[in-house]
């Protein structure tokens, strides 16, 4: 019987770690109404806390990538999961809106950063030589898996008991993952005496641990990247990606549905239903990114997403369950399907060694867009008592993103860009 390569065990641990971090962030939409009703906090203030979390975990990405090189994968995952667990536990004792901002905005934002930014490409690049696109697709889809399984469960717990019981479930899962990471996670294939999956002999590519200050490393990566036009195109499209996904849908979709009379559990179930198609779409996207022009994949994803977001307000206003299901399918298929081709283009342009930090900055742009939508959605609702304009504008911006990605240079020209960057 052929022995399973340890890289797949590392992939599994990473997969479930991302699930836990992902459900904390995606559950924000489930808790908005609960926090508003119990504490009497203004929705825009609650949205601000979630917006800070989205922005902070995104902007921390490139620094997390640099710290990974210096501290190591296992220690970074332990510290990050412990930070996340601390934030979740502190949620039980908060009673002021400023405490929500500190706990969910800063502590949970920092704790989730590693898992939801650069961990997927780091593990794929360091543990896999073959099937990298598939590995990234699987890891990226893990956020959808947590959403798929847990959001309706959390909504049911909140309906039948309270939001504290739902937080308790997340706390237990975080503690379990912390123990698993401590016992079984490894820094690199060398720690278990193997080579990355698919690599038959050691290469000459440098894998030296970075000894410089992680802040210096992160900003050096940014200074190199900003000189390349493709970086701006990827960052701009990813800003819109974040704006139209976890910033808007992840934070406000459930509240948007509730405003049209859809019950909490039903709205959470629709968001969970997206997770089914997200899981399929993102894994398939990883497979496709190994085989087709990533620019055209991104063009298709952003175009379909834009069309579905423009459709959503109409579907809810008509009370059409059929149209809401159609939206769920279309949107779910490409929620984070953009990640594997974006990582692939980044790696082709900047090389394996630099792409982790560069992608961290690109993802920071993603989360800046998410923060704008999370806070902006709350502001729009406050002034118009409706989310309609927020979703319509997000759809228009997605069409703009499709134009950004299609003018990126073809893959055959990326080697010239890579050489130019390496010579800077």
Image (cartoon, rainbow, N blue to C red):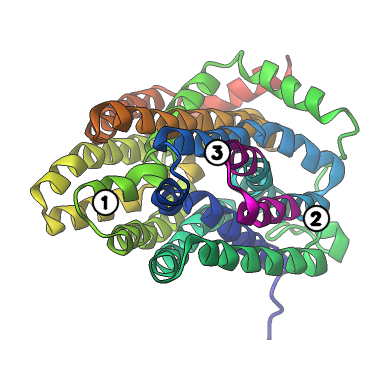
Residue 93 is a magenta residue: yes
Nearest to viewer (mark 2 / mark 1): 1
Q: Residue furthest left?
A: 318
Secondary structure at badge 1 equals: helix
Nearest to viewer (mark 2 / mark 3): 3
Secondary structure at badge 3 equals: helix
Pointer 1 or 3: first along the chain:
3
Find residue 185 and report its horizontal and vertical position in percent: 78, 63
Residue 223 is a magenta residue: no
91 lies left or right of 201: left
**Residue at mark 2 to residue at mark 3: CA–CA distance:** 34 Å
Instruction: Give me the residue at 22% from left, 56% from top.
Output: 262
Give the residue at mark 1. Answer: 258
Q: Nearer the viewer, residue 373 or 99?
A: 99
Secondary structure at badge 2 equals: helix
Instruction: Give me the residue at 60% from left, 61% from top.
Output: 15
Find residue 322 and report its horizontal and vertical position in percent: 13, 58
- Bounds of the magenta segment: 82-106
Give the residue at mark 3. Answer: 97
Q: Nearer the viewer, residue 160 or 40?
A: 40
Proximity of marks 2 and 1: CB atoms separated by less than 8 Å:
no
For mark 3, does the 10 Å Cα neighbourhood hold few (<14), some (14 to 19), or many (20 or more) residues? some
The quadrant the C terminus occupies is: top right
């Amino acid at each position: 019987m052929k022995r399973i390569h340890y890289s797949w065990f590392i992939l599994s641990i990473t997969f479930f770690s991302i699930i836990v971090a992902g459900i904390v962030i995606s559950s924000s939409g489930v808790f908005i109404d609960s926090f508003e009703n119990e504490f009497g906090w203004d929705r825009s203030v609650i949205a601000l806390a979630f917006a800070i979390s989205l922005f902070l975990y995104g902007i921390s990405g490139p620094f997390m990538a640099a710290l990974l090189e210096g501290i190591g994968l296992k220690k970074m995952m332990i510290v990050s999961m412990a930070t996340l667990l601390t934030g979740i536990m502190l949620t039980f004792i908060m009673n002021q809106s400023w405490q929500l901002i500190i706990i969910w905005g800063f502590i949970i934002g920092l704790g989730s950063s590693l898992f939801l930014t650069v961990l997927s490409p780091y593990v794929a690049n360091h543990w896999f030589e073959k099937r990298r696109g598939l590995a990234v697709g699987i890891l990226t889809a893990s956020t959808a898996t947590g959403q798929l399984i847990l959001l309706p469960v959390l909504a049911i717990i909140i309906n039948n008991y309270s939001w504290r019981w739902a937080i308790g479930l997340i706390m237990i899962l975080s503690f379990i993952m912390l123990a698993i990471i401590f016992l079984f996670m490894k820094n690199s294939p060398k720690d278990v005496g193997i080579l990355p999956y698919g690599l038959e002999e050691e290469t000459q590519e440098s894998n030296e641990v970075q000894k410089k200050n992680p802040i210096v490393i992160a900003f050096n990566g940014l200074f190199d990247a900003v000189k390349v036009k493709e970086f701006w195109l990827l960052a701009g499209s990813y800003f819109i990606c974040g704006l139209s996904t976890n910033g808007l849908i992840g934070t406000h979709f459930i509240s948007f549905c509730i405003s049209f009379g859809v019950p909490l559990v039903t709205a959470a179930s629709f968001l969970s239903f997206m997770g089914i198609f997200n899981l399929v779409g993102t894994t398939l996207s990883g497979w496709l990114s190994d085989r087709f022009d990533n620019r055209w994949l991104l063009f298709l994803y952003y175009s379909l997403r834009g069309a579905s977001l423009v459709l959503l307000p109409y579907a809810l206003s008509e009370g059409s369950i059929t149209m809401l299901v159609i939206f769920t399918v279309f949107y779910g298929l490409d929620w984070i399907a953009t990640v594997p081709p974006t990582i692939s283009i980044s790696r082709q342009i900047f090389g394996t060694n630099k792409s982790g930090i560069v992608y961290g900055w690109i993802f920071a742009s993603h989360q800046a867009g998410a923060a704008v939508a999370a806070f902006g959605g709350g502001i729009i609702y406050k002034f118009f008592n409706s989310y309609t304009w927020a979703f319509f504008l997000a759809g228009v911006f997605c069409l703009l993103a499709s134009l950004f990605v299609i003018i990126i240079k073809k893959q055959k020209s990326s080697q010239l860009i890579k050489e130019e960057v390496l010579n800077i």
